[in-house]
Amino acid sequence: VLAYAASVRPPAVYHRGGRRMRALLAQVPGLHRAVWPAPHVHASVALAMAVGTKLRERRKDLTRFRRQLLRHADGGESALDWLDGGGVSAVPPLADDAPLLLVLHTITATTREAYGLAPLLLAARARGWRPAVHVRRACG
């Protein structure tokens, strides 16, 4: 409730200034009144945080990754995170010639995020694929 009340404020308008811009903005009264966000916005954030915490706890039990560092000619590093299949979801080792699934993570999802790639990787592993995530420079 406090976070919701604290978010009530007039919208922020960024501009370079100038007499014409100030005159234009003065003609839009909605830009000077406090805006009450929809109540469900804060509820969805709280729900996402609660679910994320629960998934993070569950994911720790389900997945274990083996990191393979990749060193580049310019001195930089990236990595491959291989799903080992350990933990609760332990499955027999896969053959070296099993199909490979290489996942390129997004800006916000790596193998360390609860909401991220673990479900996809576990599903691929259950189907006999060798899943790996390429972790870009400065992302892990």
Image (cartoon, rainbow, N blue to C red):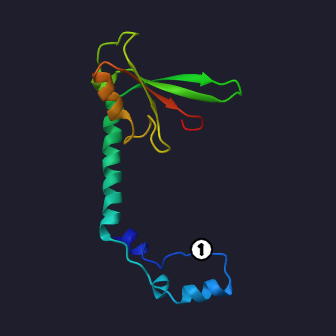
Front in this rendered view, residue 103 or 77: 103
Residue at position x 56%, y 34% in the image: 136
Q: Is residue 77 above or below residue 110?
A: above
* 17 sits to left or right of 112: right
Front in this rendered view, residue 47 or 28: 28
* 47 sits to left or right of 96: left
Front in this rendered view, residue 132 or 24: 24
Residue at position x 34%, y 12% in the image: 93
Packing grade of label 1 (10 A; few <14, some 14-19, many >=20) is few
* Rendered location of residue 119, percent (x, y): 32, 34
Circle 1 SS class: loop
Quarter containing the C terminus: top right
How many marks overall? Answer: 1
* Rendered location of residue 118, percent (x, y): 36, 33
* 30 sits to left or right of 78: left
Residue 113, quarter of picture:
top left
As drawn, the residue found furthest toward the right would be 74
* Rendered location of residue 135, percent (x, y): 52, 32
| Residue type of the residue flagged with mark 1 | Tyr
Quarter containing the N terminus: bottom left
Q: Is residue 20 above or below residue 8?
A: below
Q: Which residue is mark 1?
A: 14
Residue 73, quarter of picture:
top right
